[in-house]
Amino acid sequence: MLTSAEIEQEAHDRGFLFFTTHVNDPLPAAVGNTVLDVLTHNRLDLRARTLGERLRGGLDELATRHPVIGDVRGRGLLVGLELTEEREQCVGDTDKLGAAVTRRCAELGLHMNIVQLPGMGGTFRIAPPLTATDAEIDRGLAILDTALSEVTSRYPTPACSALPATAPVRS
């Protein structure tokens, strides 16, 4: 909630207090402790590392075949994939490209979480669950590969047509 300094002062002077719904509630605390127990017992930190390496390796491989992938970054099962124009000097509309890839992934059965901020619409936040299988990671990579191939084959880049080709930046 946002308010002015004057309203905040008036609420304070009248003794109003702000509490969240679950302040000092033992149930959410017990749930949090149980989640930590499961994470520790099942070594889900190692699972995240192993699956994350598989995901990152697959995304890095896709980046070698799809010049619109400008960057792959992250750790474990939280990875970012950034689309860019095929030529790094080109200023294009990656928001539209990202939206088109997102839409095609959804049509093929993969929900992709794209950043919805203006100018960042070509950035995907990829965070599969710890319960994902190797086959599910591979299937997601295959769908993304197909979507990228289909969308980029018909996505125009007129702003780039006069620029010389250069390799995209990868980290």
Image (cartoon, rainbow, N blue to C red):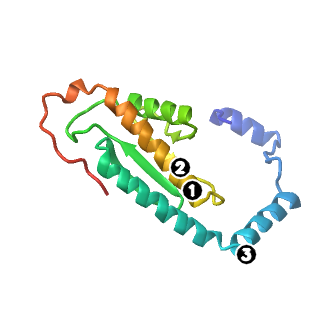
Q: Which residue is mark 3?
A: 41
Location of residue 86 by image quarter: top left
Residue closest to the eye, 44 or 35: 44
Q: How would you rate the neighbour count of disc 1 (Cα within 10 Å): few for under 14, some for 14-19, many for 20 or more?
A: few
Q: Is residue 61 left or right of residue 106?
A: left
Mark 2 vs mark 3, CA separation in Å: 28 Å
Percent of width and height locating residue 118: 43, 31
| Alpha-carbon span between mark 1 and mark 3 | 24 Å
Q: Are marks 2 and 3 in contact (CB under 8 Å)?
A: no
Judge from the rendering whether residue 98 lies leftward or rightward of residue 77; answer left or right. left
Instruction: State the residue position of label 1.
Output: 135
Residue under the point 70% across and 39% down? 9
Up-down relation of residue 98 to residue 60 (above or below): above
The residue tagged with tag 2: helix, strand or loop?
helix
Q: Which residue is mark 2?
A: 139
Closest to the camera, between mark 1 and mark 3, is: 1
Mark 3 surroundings within 10 Å by alpha-carbon count, few (fewer than 14), some (14 through 19), many (20 or more): few
Q: Hey, what amino acid is under mark 2?
A: Arg
Viewer-proximal residue among 66 and 122: 66
Dot 2 or dot 3: first in sequence order is: 3
Q: Mark 2–mark 1 contact, CB under 8 Å?
A: yes
Q: Position of residue 115 (x, y in %)?
A: 49, 39
Amino acid type of the residue tagged 3 in the rendering: His
Residue at image location 74% in from the left, 69% down from the top: 38
